Image (cartoon, helix red, strand yellow):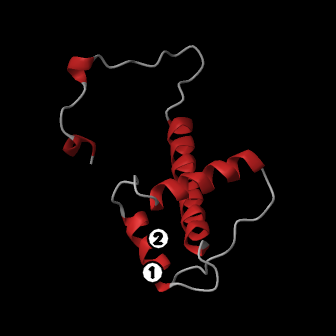
Amino acid sequence: MSEPQMHISKEGDRYLRTLIVQGAHYILGPFGEDSDLRRWGLKLAERGGKKPRTSHCCVARKLAVLLHKLWEAERSTNHAEKPQSGERRSVRVASEVPSSTAEFR
């Protein structure tokens, strides 16, 4: 079940909102890399609507949700790996880092 598209509220950090909207403009602009988010935004822009820049706001909101989920995942991962007091965290050297991502799955 999908959630309805909501607007970006005017609450919170104004500078952060500005950066997210600028990121959406970059993603939908001529220099944005091909991605699912870009394709979705361009498809939304092609449909048209009342306002021509609605797709930018929608992409900005999806980008904000994505960044929030990544931040939460990183925060929970860092919290789980936090060493106990007096215990040292081991650091991998370059030779110990696996070369393929298959080992992380």
Q: Nearer the viewer, residue 97 or 31?
A: 31
Left or right position of 51 against 47: right
The local secondary structure at tag 2 comes to: helix
Amino acid type for the residue under numbered disc 2: Gly
| Dots 1, 2 in contact, CB < 8 A | no
* Residue 13 seen in render: no
- Res. 4 mark: none
Check residue 41 in the rendering and tell me which mark sits there, or answer none.
2
Q: Position of residue 101 (x, y in %)?
A: 23, 42
Residue 43 picture location, percent across and down: 42, 77
Residue 104 can be seen, yes or no: yes
Q: Is residue 81 above or below residue 31?
A: above
Nearer the camera: disc 1 or disc 2 = 1
At x 37% / y 66%, what residue is drawn?
36
Q: Residue 39, how many percent across, how many down?
A: 38, 69
Count of marks, rendered view: 2
Tell me the kind of residue under disc 1. Answer: Glu
Where does residue 79 sit, x and y in percent of width and height? 56, 37
Q: Secondary structure at mark 1?
A: helix
Q: Residue at (54%, 58%) from the top-left corner?
A: 24
View extreme (right): residue: 11
The residue pinned by badge 1 equals: 46
For the point 63% across and 48% down, the residue is 19
Q: CA distance from mark 1 to mark 2?
A: 9 Å
| 91 horizontally vs 6: left or right | left
Q: Nearer the viewer, residue 42 or 40?
A: 42
Q: Residues within 10 Å of mark 2 (few under 14, many from 20)?
A: many
Relative to residue 42, is residue 89 depicted above or below? above
State which tag comes first along the sequence, 1 or 2: 2
Give the vertical position of 23 relative to 57 (above or below).
Answer: above
Q: Nearer the viewer, residue 12 or 101?
A: 12
Q: Residues within 10 Å of mark 1 (few under 14, many from 20)?
A: few
